[in-house]
Image (spheres, rainbow, N blue to C red):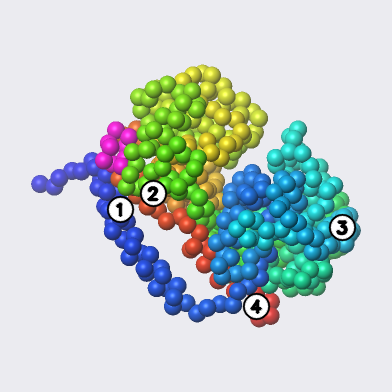
Amino acid sequence: MTAIVDPGTQARRRALRRSATRDGAATASLHRRTDRTAQLTPQPARQVLFVTTEMTDFIKTGGLGDVAAALPRALSATQDMRVLIPAYPCVLAKARSLTWVGRTRAFAGLPETRIGQMETEDGLVVYVVHQPDLFEREGSSPYISPIGGDWSDNAIRFATLSYAAAQIAIGKAGMAWQPDVLHLNDWPTALAACYARWDGHDVPTVLTLHNLAYQGLFPVAMRHALGFPRQTPEAEFHGHLSFLRAGLIHADYITAVSGSYARQIIQPAHGMGLHLQLEKKAAQGRLVGILNGIDPSWNPAIDPALPAPFTVNQMASRTAIAAKVREEFGLREPRGPLFAFVARMVHQKGVDMVCDAAPQIVAAGGQLIMIGCGDISMERDVARLARRFPGQVGVHIGFDDGMARRMFAGSDFLLMPSRFEPCGLSQMYAQAYGSLPIAHATGGLIDTIEDGVTGLLFQHPHVAGLRHSLQRAFRIFEDPALLGAMRRAAMLEPHDWSGPASKYASLYALASPVRAAA
């Protein structure tokens, strides 16, 4: 007679096997990676200018800031990595010393700039584009004014940044250092590939797409002020100029921040109107998915934001951290699991689904804590939720890095019902801290969460899918062996930058001779 095994038992066995296998394989895996690295033929270091509008050292609104802080550092062991960022007030305030090393002349409607050089405490070289009228402004966002809405001159602001990057790359900024490769990030820097090409220079360029939804669309009437040539069909997109479309056509290689996202964006449903151009790049072998890593500081054994450290083998401190987090959010003594939401409060992140599912969480004995800011109407909905369920739902409008880290460390589950998610970092932070992500199966969430082992996935971006996953989460919470096994499996997931950095180094090597070979 065949024994019938219930799904919960199957999941428990699978998680336990996975956890035990990873414990035993960790050392062997490290040796294998080391051996493979030793066998690689050394590549000459490339000089790479990493151009960004955010860097967590100074300013951050999303995942780009974390990537810009971590990836150049991870690559610096094998490449000559330098960062270019606008000279925002927060950047200048943290400059220990600043040396003026170059300048760019005014061009069309773009003003002249000065290029300054500084170093971070750990020695990473950072160049700043100094143009006070454009970049020395109030507010905590590079893109949005303190009263809300995009700055009206964002086209000029980020075209100026892109033009400065191109001028440095083609040797016209008067600097002693010149990059072999430009690494651009999203629409605000994408025009650098175009300005170099329009000036007759084939500068090897990599453009990383962190979120295709933001494309840098501006009126066609700005063409002259931006210095566009008369005929630039590659920059036109449904009656607008598109910084991103122009950049991805001229860039040598496009990277998406996960393999699944790279496959999704060549389809009409996820390509945001650019799927045909991306499909062409993919057919040429020039669209690559490289999953992001996370910074080494995301380690619960050494994190100063936590009231007590813990490791995969010693998790007792998580109980005390959970109590601290509940106190911070004004929650009552718990009867069930603690769910966390750490994200921008925008439609993409599924805030509405969380609000719709919150009564189910509370009714079943769970609690919910939320942190983030964004759309004002969604902030109001979230605040209303806290008033409706005092002591069971806690909300912090804004962002506090230390608080977010304690939320990951003290919660049992992280809610990530994103409608689309190019990579996502929060699910990896949560896994590293033993909180199991509950996510919509899209983009990088597919690549980083194994359903029933290191988290839970639901297939369609509707609240019904989230509710079903919440039912699974409550059952897992009631099974300490399964919960513990899944936590261990999640915490043992490798999320460091060594693998992604190696792939980017290989891509730089491919990109730098590509024009000569074309």
Residue 160 makes an appearance in the image: yes
Mark 3–mark 2 distance (CA, rounded to whole Å):
49 Å
Question: Badges 3 and 2: C-beta atoms under 8 Å apart?
Answer: no
Q: Gap in Å between the C-alphas at discs 4 and 1?
A: 43 Å
Q: What residue type is disc 4 on?
A: Pro
Callout 3 amino acid? Glu
Q: Are marks 2 and 1 in contact (CB under 8 Å)?
A: no
Secondary structure type for disc 4: loop
- The amino acid at mark 2 is Met
Q: Residue at the spot x=28%, y=59% of the render?
A: 24
Q: Secondary structure at mark 1?
A: helix
| Residue numbers of the magenta segment | 476-484
Q: Is residue 153 above or below residue 277?
A: above
Q: Are marks 3 and 4 in contact (CB under 8 Å)?
A: no
Label 4: which residue? 513
- Considering the numbered disc 3 on the image, is that residue within a helix, a strand or a loop? loop
Pick whichever of labels 2 and 1 is earlier in the sequence: 1
- In this view, the residue farthest toward the left is 1
Q: Which residue in the protein does label 3 denote?
A: 112
Give the percent coordinates (x, y) of residue 422. Answer: 55, 51
Viewer-side label of 3, 4 = 3
* Residue 204 seen in the current view: no
Q: Quadrant of residue 338?
A: top left
Horizontal arrangement in the rendering, residue 285 relative to residue 135 (left or right): left
Q: Quarter holding the C terminus?
A: bottom right
